[in-house]
Amino acid sequence: MARYTFQRLLLASAALLLLASLPVKAAESCPALLDFNFKRLQDDASQDLCQYTGKVILVVNTASYCGYTGQYEGLEQLYAKYKDRGLVVLGFPSNDFNQEPRGNTEIANFCYNTYGVKFPMLAKSSVIGKDANPMYALLTKNSGKKPTWNFFKYLIDRNGNLVSSYSSHTTPEDVTLISAIEKALISGKGVRAQGNN
């Protein structure tokens, strides 16, 4: 009887150790460029960007009162076309260039009602300078390039590696950008592409 109890205790201890190690392993598998939590634009619910591990991600700083605001439509079309293959577009509204004075709820309503935006949008934050959100600070550090205006883009591959950055002039329909996205979707390895900066 004592031997049977000892075996059960040993088995239970091993199971607990295994369970305790799972969160650590999950955190280790999240790439540094995605290891952040942000609030969603529409409801302030916390979003763990690690959920996008294994996806190709186009990160874009946005604004409602910009000459490039029409790019929302193209970004939504890109997302709709490629989301089933693993593309995620992440929008980060920002007032760094004084073209997004609205609050989160107003921005969310504008994006959805004007452009039908369904790709993930995160709460308004800074993307440049000392107040840049931590993801943008790391993207800037890794690329050596910071957003110079609204709708600047960073492309991240399935392994969480930065592929390239693209200026605001590079539209979502640009063949160079689409080609880099398609290559990243096909590949499970880091893809290096030359962006238009």
Image (cartoon, rainbow, N blue to C red):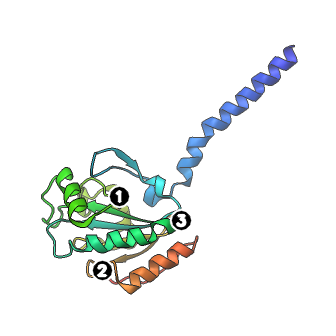
Label placed on residue 128: none
Within-10-Å neighbours for mark 3: few <14, some 14–19, many 20+: many
Disc 2 marks which residue? 171
Disc 3 marks which residue? 159
* Of labels 1 and 3, the one closer to you: 1
Label placed on residue 120: 1
Q: Is residue 84 visible?
A: yes
Q: Quadrant of the C terminus?
A: bottom left
Q: Position of residue 191 (x, y in %)?
A: 52, 77
Q: Quadrant of the N terminus?
A: top right
Label 1, secondary structure: give it.
Answer: loop
- The residue at 28%/45% (across/down) is 44
Dot 1 or dot 2: first in sequence order is: 1
Amino acid type for the residue under numbered disc 3: Asn
Quote the CA–CA distance across marks 1 and 3: 20 Å
> Are discs 1 and 3 less than 8 Å apart at CB?
no
Left or right relative to 156: residue 64: left
Dot 3 or dot 2: first in sequence order is: 3
- The residue at 17%/54% (across/down) is 106
Label 2, secondary structure: give it.
Answer: loop
**Residue placed most toward the observer, 107 or 136:** 107
Left or right relative to 189: residue 4: right
> Are discs 3 and 2 less than 8 Å apart at CB?
no
Q: Position of residue 90 (x, y in %)?
A: 36, 62
Dot 1 or dot 3: first in sequence order is: 1
Q: Position of residue 13 (x, y in %)?
A: 71, 28
Label 3, secondary structure: give it.
Answer: loop
The quarter of the displayed image where residue 18 is located: top right
- The residue at 33%/68% (across/down) is 76
**Residue placed most toward the observer, 79 or 68:** 79
